[in-house]
Amino acid sequence: MRTLTVVSVLVGGALGGLAVPARAQDDAPACPLHAAHQAAAQAGTAGHHEQVDQRHDDATGVAHMDSVHHFDLGPRGGSIRLEVTDPADTGGRDRIRTHLGLIAAEFAQGRFDLPMMIHDQTPPGVETMRRLKSAIRYRYSALPRGGRVEISTDNAEARQAIHDFLRFQIDEHRTGDPHDPPAR
């Protein structure tokens, strides 16, 4: 719309002062997709996070509103925790356990298809984690309300990649977890 407004003003000036009214931004839009463009612009990051949440819900089988994610950075790597909020939700707990067991096995093979699908992009650190997969260990363990995948390495480059990956997850899932490992 701004382009049309500028063009209208320029055309008006080029016609020797002939009054050509510029379209007010609140007027009815000429573009049939105007509402969709406006909604997309207003949604911005919020729309992205909603899509991430929806894809995550589909992948895990547990609604993000019924679970809590944590991504913890540690001196040797970090961990991914996912748990149901209701201890009586044993079905959700079991789906989380299946999901995280799969994640640990896939990551160990250098396969990060699921996070790439959930986030609609390749998360930071993934390429290095693939390249150095033999230097990284993934250990799944069940928790009372879900599970955890511990990610560890003795390789400094791999550790940095793990931290980059986990920081991205913290931001994407809006967990509020610390971006730095605890001080030793």
Image (cartoon, rainbow, N blue to C red):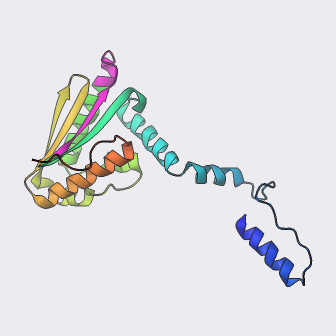
50 relative position to 139: left or right: right
Magenta residue span: 78-93
Q: Residue at x 81, y 63 (%)?
A: 23
Residue 36 on image: x %, y %: 66, 50
**Farthest right residue in view:** 18
**Farthest top residue in view:** 88
Q: Indicate the quadrant containing the N terminus: top left, top right, bottom left or bottom right.
A: bottom right
Q: Residue at x 38, y 30 (%)?
A: 61
Q: Residue at x 43, y 39 (%)?
A: 53
Residue 30 on image: x %, y %: 79, 59
Residue 6 sits inside the magenta stretch: no
Above or below for 61 versus 179:
above
139 relative position to 98: left or right: left
**Farthest left residue in view:** 154
Q: Nearer the viewer, residue 33 or 39?
A: 39
Residue 84 on image: x %, y %: 32, 25
Residue 71: quarter of image: top left
Q: How many marks?
A: 0
Residue 81 sits inside the magenta stretch: yes
141 relative position to 16: left or right: left
Above or below for 32 versus 80:
below
Residue 122 on image: x %, y %: 34, 56
